[in-house]
Image: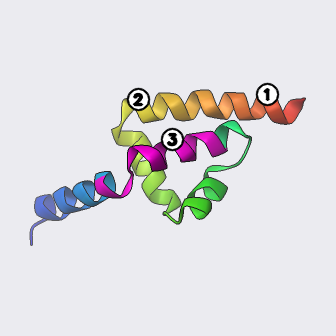
Amino acid sequence: MNRTTDEQEERARLWTLWTDQRREQFIAYLAEGHTPTYAARRLKVSRSNAYKLRAEDESFAQAWEEATQEGTETLEQ
């Protein structure tokens, strides 16, 4: 297999694994003040895949940023 095929397969697997429900729950954990590591463990997904998805999906990245800010504010109260 060539590198392009491997990358395409990895990308397809990533998008299949991260359903809308799983993305929403991950973001919810961040908004509660949890770390990406905690959220990934709770959802039984790899933290590195969460970061890959954030790099590839602009709307997920934006939601991640907003949730992190919200979580920080929650923890500071």
Q: Which of the marked residues, 3 or 1, is nearer the chain's N terminus?
A: 3
Q: Which of the marked residues, 2 or 1, is nearer the chain's N terminus?
A: 2
Q: Which residue is mark 3?
A: 24
Which SS class for mark 3?
helix
Q: Is residue 50 above or below residue 76?
A: below
Contact? badges 3 and 2 (CB < 8 Å) = no
Q: Nearer the viewer, residue 7 or 44?
A: 44
- View extreme (front): residue: 21
Q: Which residue is mark 2?
A: 59
Q: Amino acid at mark 1?
A: Glu
Question: Does residue 62 appear left or right of residue 18 in this picture?
Answer: right
Contact? badges 2 and 1 (CB < 8 Å) = no
Label drawn at residue 73 = 1
Which quadrant is home to the C terminus? top right
Q: Which of the marked residues, 3 or 2, is nearer the chain's N terminus?
A: 3
- For the point 52% across and 30% down, which residue is it? 63
